[in-house]
């Protein structure tokens, strides 16, 4: 039984509604109430639009791969859930491997 929307189910429609309503308000009134002013940005072109579509598609592909990766990890952990020591060892190994994949001066260094 579904009792309501989860936060992630309402997030995208809420963001779309907020952006569209602000854009309509901005167009109708001509007022610009933005706390940020980027005067150094060049004018937007169709090339920028196409680049943003490509970046969005790449982000969507990465999100899809992320979902499938964690579904696979969930299936794997379901198969070995009775072996708690093995799960703990695999968890420790995965946490130990993460910092070896990133250099110490990586911009977003894992908390190790």
Image (tube, helix red, strand yellow):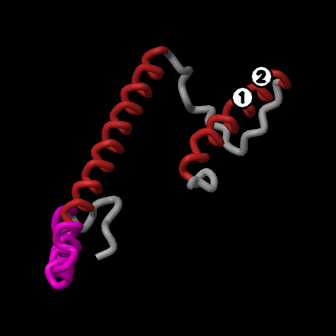
Above/below status of 75 relative to 83:
above
The reply to whether dot 1 and dot 2 touch (C-beta < 8 Å) is: yes
Left or right of residue 50, residue 90 in this image? left
**Gap between marks 1 and 2, in whole Å?**
6 Å
**Residue range (magenta):** 77-102
Q: Quick one: 6 or 28, which is closer to the camera?
A: 6
Q: Residues within 10 Å of mark 2 (few under 14, many from 20)?
A: few
Kindly report the secondary structure that dominates the magenta region of the rendered protein: helix
- Residue that numbered label 2 is attached to: 27
**If the image is split into quadrants, where does the N terminus sit?**
bottom right
Label 2: state its secondary structure: helix
Q: Residues within 10 Å of mark 1 (few under 14, many from 20)?
A: few
Helix, strand or loop under label 1: helix
Of residue 4 and residue 43, the one placed in the foreground of this image is 4
Residue 47: x and y in percent read 43, 17
| Residue 25 screen position, x and y as percent | 80, 29
């Amino acid at each position: 039984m579904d009792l309501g929307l989860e936060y992630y189910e309402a997030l995208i429609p809420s963001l779309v509604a907020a952006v569209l309503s602000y854009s309509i308000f901005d167009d109708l009134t001509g007022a610009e109430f933005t706390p940020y002013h980027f005067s150094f940005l060049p004018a937007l072109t169709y090339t920028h639009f196409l680049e943003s579509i490509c970046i969005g598609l790449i982000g969507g592909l990465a999100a899809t791969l992320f979902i499938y990766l964690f579904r696979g990890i969930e299936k794997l952990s379901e198969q070995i859930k009775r072996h708690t020591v093995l799960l703990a060892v695999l968890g420790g190994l995965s946490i130990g491997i993460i910092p070896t994949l990133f250099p110490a001066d990586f911009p977003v260094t894992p908390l190790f």
